[in-house]
Image (tube, helix red, strand yellow):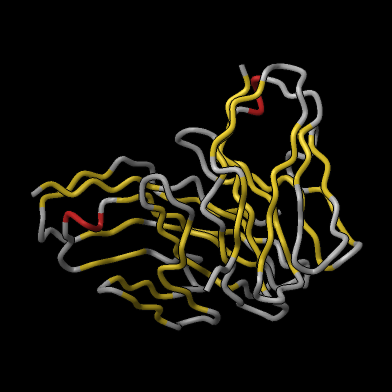
Amino acid sequence: NAGVTQTPKFRILKIGQSMTLQCTQDMNHNYMYWYRQDPGMGLKLIYYSVGAGITDKGEVPNGYNVSRSTTEDFPLRLELAAPSQTSVYFCASTDTGYGNTIYFGEGSWLTVV
Amino acid sequence: GDSVTQMEGPVTLSEEAFLTINCTYTATGYPSLFWYVQYPGEGLQLLLKATKADDKGSNKGFEATYRKETTSFHLEKGSVQVSDSAVYFCALSDASGTYKYIFGTGTRLKVLA
């Protein structure tokens, strides 16, 4: 009963480093999302995907890249990390259809120093 | 564009008090509406949802009614417990087929014994 799995859970990066946050779901969902949550704030959509091979930008895509080569996986790449990218990152997925629940991973805490 | 506005927190209540967290939305068409809860250090999980006007979502003693005339989806619970302390997010899923989920900024609830 895994659902949406994110790794790593915690990471400290130095300014200018790059890394990939991994996300995989085992529910065969078509739609996947990456959000960031800054302290005391709501969720902001970074990128989303409506199926393998199809991705699109959300509200705050700058500094990030994504790919979707399979239905299950939706990694988020941070290039040239900056302190402004210090945040909690959530991957989520949902199935096609009106009113479906969106399921979240447990989050990845990223600090850029 | 679509948006969700929810009351600012934190909300501090004594155990067994009545809870209301206000949520209003702006959307075209007929969105689905959700309440999610986030416990410390965890991801968001669905609390309840409603997919059409006048529907009432309920779970774990929490209720919310989809009011199209007032574009609201207020969360209520008759008697809160310490274990209800968490951050609550109101969200909508638009009906236009883009499958984007818009979240409010979250309301932190603290229940005192």
Horizontal side of residue B13 vs A77, given as left or right: left
Work out whether residue B25 or residue B35 is closer to the camera in this orientation and state it. Answer: B35
Please state the horizontal and vertical placement of residue A83, each as a whole percent of the image. 65, 20
Identity of the residue drawn at 50% across and 38% down = A41
Identity of the residue drawn at 91% across and 62% down = A53
| Quarter location, residue A112 | top right
| Quarter location, residue A77 | top right
Q: Is residue A44 above or below residue B71?
A: above
Work out whether residue B52 or residue A42 is closer to the camera in this orientation and state it. Answer: A42
Please state the horizontal and vertical placement of residue A60, each as a whole percent of the image. 73, 39
Q: Is residue A51 above or below residue A5?
A: below
| Quarter location, residue A17 | top right
Residue at the outermost right position: A53
Number of numbered markers: 0
Work out whether residue A31 or residue B12 is closer to the camera in this orientation and state it. Answer: A31
Please state the horizontal and vertical placement of residue B104, each as a whole percent of the image. 51, 51
Please state the horizontal and vertical placement of residue A76, each as a whole percent of the image. 75, 45
Q: Is residue A102 above or below residue B104?
A: below
Q: Where, quadrant-wise, is the C terminus of chain A in this rendering?
A: top right
Identity of the residue drawn at 44% across and 48% down = B106
